[in-house]
Every structure is written in structure tokens, then in C-alpha cells.
Image (tube, rainbow, N blue to C red):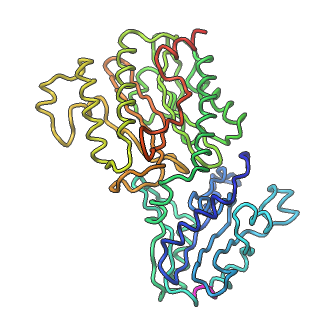
Amino acid sequence: MKYHKIDSKLFIKNRKNFTAKMKSNSLAVFNSNDIYPISADSTLPFEQHRDIFYLSGVDQEESILVLFPDCPKKEHKEILFLKETSELIAIWEGEKLTKEAAFETSGIKTVYWLQDMEKIMFELMTQCDTVYINTNEHYRANVETETREDRFTKWLKEKYPAHSVAKSNPILQRLRSVKDPIEIDLIQTACNITEKGFRRLLKFVKPGVWEYEIEAEFMHELLCNRSKKFAYTPIIASGNNANVLHYIENNQQCKDGDLILMDVGAEYANYSSDLTRTIPVNGRYTKRQKEVYNAVNRVKNEATKLLVPGALWAEYHIEVGKLMTSELLGLGLIDKKDVKNEDPTWPAYKKYFMHGTSHHMGLDTHDYGILTEPIKANMVFTVEPGIYIPDEGFGIRIEDDVVVQKNGEPFNLMRNIPIEAEEIEELMNS
């Protein structure tokens, strides 16, 4: 791993919180992701399943975590199953976790090799009544690939059909949405790397550069700062490309007079950051561009203040809609008649701002969180309003990552990243 070692007390605490929510005499199982094939002998880079990472810190393939807090054998209350390492594996693939290293990483004392899993699971299943399976119930999930977790669940249910089955995901949705201070520090590190990348871009961008060159400059900064990759597929959208919300081709030349919408973020230790800034190719916003930019920034600032404990997701977005409606009226993009005659299910402002304002963020860029439950302190959200005007050839989005506070306004993890139009112009022309 490129990242610095994470204190195992985070994972110990996470397991304690999870097992406290389990039914009596129950067992929970979590699997690593597969290494996914491309073709021939090529594979995608390994990405750990965030749930097993959250509960153990284990960041390698072919790993299984079993939690059985009521197990009669003390040593089987927490178990890691790992692929057995060897000198040959170390030579060909690099160092894998030994049993000792797995304990240092996770705080779990009982570590077995994977070949012993079925035998030990048989013993455990004779002692428990309920088994927690780990399903993907994220509100944006749309998965067609059968995962290693899916295959394990299928095997478990077929082999032990008499056991009651419960779901881990509702517990994890609630636990993972509220961040530990160690997690907030890791997200802050990802944001700090993102800041370095953005400041590099302010010095690099000029008329004639290509969107993919901007992407490459940002990637350089990530790798130089212990980030292995972008937290998500980057959007480098110049001119009218910014009006395509998930534009990822990044293959157009940036023209004098255009704006560039850059939705980019570093990952660090599997934690995400999520930044959007919209900057002028030539280093100067036109009067109209700055007018719209400042309107979006005002909405972002006011929307941020609404993210407080107890707030409800649906009501939050209604209030942000009112803020945006006011700004669009001021910009002359809609008029009072549009507002009066609007369809309540698709308000007038949606013509220019058609996406949500915020999402949970953490181990996943669109992180866990139950949207029908009140917001809590130490949740991390993006705040990302935008105004998209195809007829004028540009779109503007501004996005920061913030931590909800017990008292007062959210804490901005991107507070040091240039955002005011005048500061961006000054830095681009210095």
C-alpha cells in the first residue's frame, strides 16, 4: 500500500460497534472483492471491498472476516481467513499479510489460512442460530457482476439452509455514515492531496491545452503524495462539455474564453475526496461567467449552513431549491411566471440545476447513509450546486466536502482550496 499504516484501534472500534448491533447468538461474514479480469491474463487493479476494510483494515484479495461475539470459544469471536503467503508468492506478487502482520493491521488475534475455512465454518455454524450476509443495498447500486461476496452467500445458504438469515448492510449504512476522528483525518489527507493537484492545475491551464493533459497533471500530484488513483473517474469538461453531467471523455482542446469544469478528487487509504471547481481557460472570467459563478458559490455557502444534526434529507433539498430559484431569478434565467406555473415535481430551477446538492462521502465517493433518517454530527457530505447553460456555452459547478458539527456550521475539509473567483484569477495570472 502507498498509504501510511492506520492505527488498528479504528478497526477494533468499528467491529465493536457492529457486533453491538447483532442479534444474540449470530455470526457475520465479510469477503474481499475479486480481482476482476479484463481478457487474456490482464486484470483490473485490485480494489478492496470497503466493508471488510472498514471492519479489519485488511487490504488484500481472498480474505474473509468472521464475527461471532457470542461464540463459546473466546478465540473464535473474531476470525480472519487469509490466503496463505509464501516466499514464492512474495517473489511473484509482492508481500502478502502474514498472521502476525494481519494482527498488527486489524487487532484480530485469530488468523487462519483460507484452506481451513470450510472446516472451521462448519464448527461455527453448529454453534450459531443466525448468519448475517452482506448485500449491497446502496441507493445508487446497479450491479450486474456476481461478486465474491455473492458467491460466498450462495454457498453458505445452500450448505446451511436451516439457519436464520439477517442483513449486515442496514447496520453498516448507519455506522459507516458517521465518521470516527481517524476517518476524518484520512479524508482530510485526501482533500489535502486534492488541493495540491488543483493548485498545480491553476499554474498549468492556458488556451490550447487538452483536457487529458489537465487530467495527467492532476494524476502526477496524486501519485507523488501517496494516493494510488483518482477517487472516481475524473471530469475535465471545457466549454459546453460541462453541460454533460458525467462527461468523462476528457479529449477536447480548451479554448480561449471558455470555462473548464473540473470534478476531481484524490483517494487516500481507500477514503475519498470530491472536489469541483470551474476555472477560466485564459485566467479571466467574463462578466457573465463571474456573475453565474458567484451565484453558484452563494448557493453553496448557504446550502452548507443547512447541513446540521436533525435536518432531513428531503427538506434540505427543498430549501436548496429555494436558494437556487432566487439566484436564477437574479440572473434572468427564469422569471416569476416560470416559478408560479412550475410543476412541483420538477420545479423551474431544475432546468438549470437538475442534480442533487449533496451526498454522503467517505470510503466510497457516494458513501453509505440512509437518506430517510436525520443527519447526524460527524457525517461527511459534499455540497455541489451548479448552473448549466447550454445556450451560453458553459456550465458551472462548485463543490466542497464538509463535516457536520454537533454545534454550529459544518467544518469545511476543503477550506484551503481556492474558490473565490478573484483568488482563482490572481493565482492563474501570478
Q: Is residue 405 left or right of residue 95?
A: left
- Return the residue nearer the eye: 357 or 104: 104
Magenta span main SS: helix
Asked if residue 404 can be seen in this view, the reply is yes
**Residue for point 64% across, 41% down:** 229
Taking the magenta stretch, the answer to whether it contains residue 304 is no
Against 241, is 183 above or below? Answer: below
Residue sitting nearer the eye, 245 or 310: 310
Please provide percent x and percent y for residue 289: 39, 15
Could you tell me which residue is drawn at 67 percent across and 74 percent down? 79
**Quarter-of-image position of residue 29:** bottom right
Q: Is residue 312 above or below residue 286?
A: below
Q: Nearer the viewer, residue 128 or 188?
A: 188
Q: Using residue 355 as the reference point, say whether residue 143 is left or right of it.
A: right
Q: Is residue 237 visible?
A: no
Left or right: 175, with 94 as reference point:
left
- Please state the horizontal and vertical placement of residue 142, each as a whole percent of the image: 43, 55
Taking 310 as reference, is 387 above or below it? above
Instruction: Residue 33: give x, y in percent of width and height.
Output: 61, 61
Name the image quarter holding the C terminus. top right
Q: Looking at the rendering, which quadrant does residue 192 occupy?
A: top right
Q: Which residue is at 70% across, 66% downward?
A: 107
Residue segment shown in magenta: 122-126
Name the spot of residue 255 as percent of width and height, x first: 50, 13
Query: How many numbered marks have been drawn onto this rendered protein structure?
Result: 0
